[in-house]
Structures are given as structure tokens and as C-alpha cells.
Image (cartoon, helix red, strand yellow):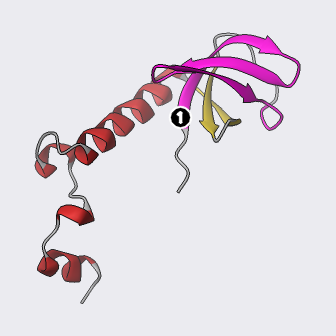
Amino acid sequence: MCIGIPMQVTALEPGHALCEGRGERRRVNTALVDGVATGDWLLVFLGDARERIDAARASEVNATLDLVLGAMRGEGGAGDAGFELPSRMSADQLRQLAGQ
């Protein structure tokens, strides 16, 4: 599975952007996104920008990623995140999830 990470452009190079997001800096390929400017938010998959997004969407994606990370760490209850990881489900819950 590939997860898109919102990153904000801090500087530009030909065909690339220097971006910051989720506590890291990356050099991102921008070949698939036209007209990238400093300050833009990009949705980055494996080092490639796939989409330009607005700040509100970047915030939504970051909040969702925070929920997933918290659930993976066992923080909070499944009710807080709105879902339960399969690794924490009982056999009956897994069968129900699979439609059995």
C-alpha cells in the first residue's frame, strides 16, 4: 500500500521541489504536477508529487495519518479513531468483517 504524504514546497529546482511535511524534508519529483510554486501543498507518494492540494486538504490528510499512527501504536481506543485494526480483532469479528 502506498500512502500519500502532504508536503509543502519550500524551494524549487528544475523538475523537483524541496518540501517539508510530517517532520521531514524531501527532494520531490514534480514531473506529474504542472506549475508548482513555493508555498504549494503537494500530495507525495514515494518521492513523487502526484497532486497539488490546498492547505485544508493537507490538514485533513495529516489528521487522518495521525489517527492511523495512533491506532498502530495502540493509543486511545478503537472508538476514538472510528475503526479497529484487524490485528486487534477477535476471530468472530474477523469472520464478520470477511462476511462469513
Is label 1 in a helix, a strand or a loop? Answer: strand
- Give percent across and percent down for residue 73: 23, 42
Q: Is residue 25 left or right of residue 95?
A: right
Give the quarter of the image for residue 29: top right
| Residue type highlighted by circle 1 | Ile
Up-down: is 31 above or below 74? above
Residue hosting label 1: 5
Q: Residue 29: within the magenta?
A: yes
Up-down: is 35 above or below 90? above
Give the quarter of the image for residue 36: top right
Quarter holding the C terminus is bottom left
Q: Which residues are magenta?
A: 5-33
Up-down: is 42 above or below 14? below
Give the quarter of the image for residue 95: bottom left
Residue reaching furthest to the right: 14
- Give percent across and percent down for residue 94: 21, 77
Q: Residues within 10 Å of mark 1 (few under 14, many from 20)?
A: many
Q: Is residue 85 left or right of residue 30?
A: left
- Give percent across and percent down for residue 19: 63, 18
Up-down: is 35 above or below 89? above
Residue reaching furthest to the bottom: 100
Tell me the residue at 53%/34% (across/down): 5
Tell me the residue at 12%/73% (across/down): 90
Tell me the residue at 52%/46% (across/down): 3
- How many discs mark residues in the rendered view? 1
Q: Residue 91: within the magenta?
A: no
Q: Is residue 20 left or right of residue 37?
A: left
Dominant secondary structure of the magenta stretch?
Answer: strand
Front-most of residues 80 and 70: 70
